[in-house]
Image: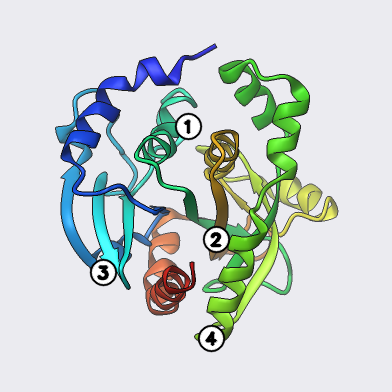
Amino acid sequence: MVNLKAKYSGIVSELKSAAPFEPELALILGSGLGDFADKINRLKSISTNEIKGFPESTVEGHQGKIHFCEYENKKLVVFQGRLHFYEGYNLSDCLIPVHIAANLNAKSLILTNAAGGINSNFKPGDLMLITQFFSFNIKKELSNIFRLPSVELRNSFSNFPSKNLNDRIKEAALKEKIFIQQGTYWYGKGPSYETPAEIKMLANLGVDAVGMSTVHEAIYAKILGMNVAAVSCITNYAAGITSEKLSHKEVMETAEKVKDPFERLIKKLVELI
């Protein structure tokens, strides 16, 4: 079992001292979506490489910064970038942003990510509200970290997402006239993309999009009692859906194209929370 409270006590203590306020809402920005942090009032920014013991983010599009921001009289802590299991870190390291947000007393968490689309009705550039998760291995990984009774871990899965937050996201999309898909997100460890055969299997299981983040963050946040919701940017077709070769460059290019609707959606959501 990993004692996250003890492991990250120094990081939490440093950020509590540096924080200009207690945030109401935390936001973790996925690949290519980090520019949102530049579009709201930033009161204070901290580079994670300045925080002793904070692992370095190594993936393009994840800058490794923590911003304390205000928008529409709401106080936010925004994580510009995240850590991934496939970067060589322990899964517990990848939970640092959630751990920080909860210990700063943020009550709600919005997760965003870039994902590959499986559903034939999805296309690159779509936003997808995650309605449920699917994974072959994440429950075992989390169980090894927390030593939780299986029923408690299962309840954390089944209680995602927080209905009130998902309702607010759908309301925000309606008000901003942004079309938003809804679907099931499958988590894979990475770093390689799924094979066409794996994607075919996942399609048969009813999965709509695939990615390499978010699930463990959401489940940990639920364990900590936070309200949680997640939005994927469909940045590419999953392997085998088309003949195109998958690349992180495509992910970044598509994320660039959806910056405007993504920004409007999140801003309206903050207003409505």
Give the residue at x 55% y 71%: 124
Up/down of 172 relative to 83, above or below? below
To which residue does mark 4 refer? 175
Residue 144: name its quadrant.
Answer: top right
Q: Amino acid at mark 2?
A: Ser
Give the residue at x 70% y 40%: 157
Crowd around label 1: few <14 · some 14–19 · many ≥20 (10 Å): some
Report the front residue among 262 and 157.
Answer: 157
Q: Say the numbered circle drawn on residue 85.
A: 1
Q: Reading the chain from its start, which is encountered first: label 2 or label 1?
A: 1
Q: Reading the chain from its start, which is encountered first: label 4 or label 1?
A: 1
Q: Reading the chain from its start, which is encountered first: label 1 or label 3?
A: 3
Q: Say the numbered circle drawn on residue 135.
A: none
Crowd around label 4: few <14 · some 14–19 · many ≥20 (10 Å): few
To which residue does mark 2 refer? 232
Is 205 left or right of 99, judged from the image as shown?
right
Q: Amino acid at mark 3?
A: Ile
Give the residue at x 53% y 86%: 175
Identify the secondary structure beneath mark 4.
helix
Q: Amino acid at mark 1?
A: Phe
Of circles 2 and 3, which is in front? 3
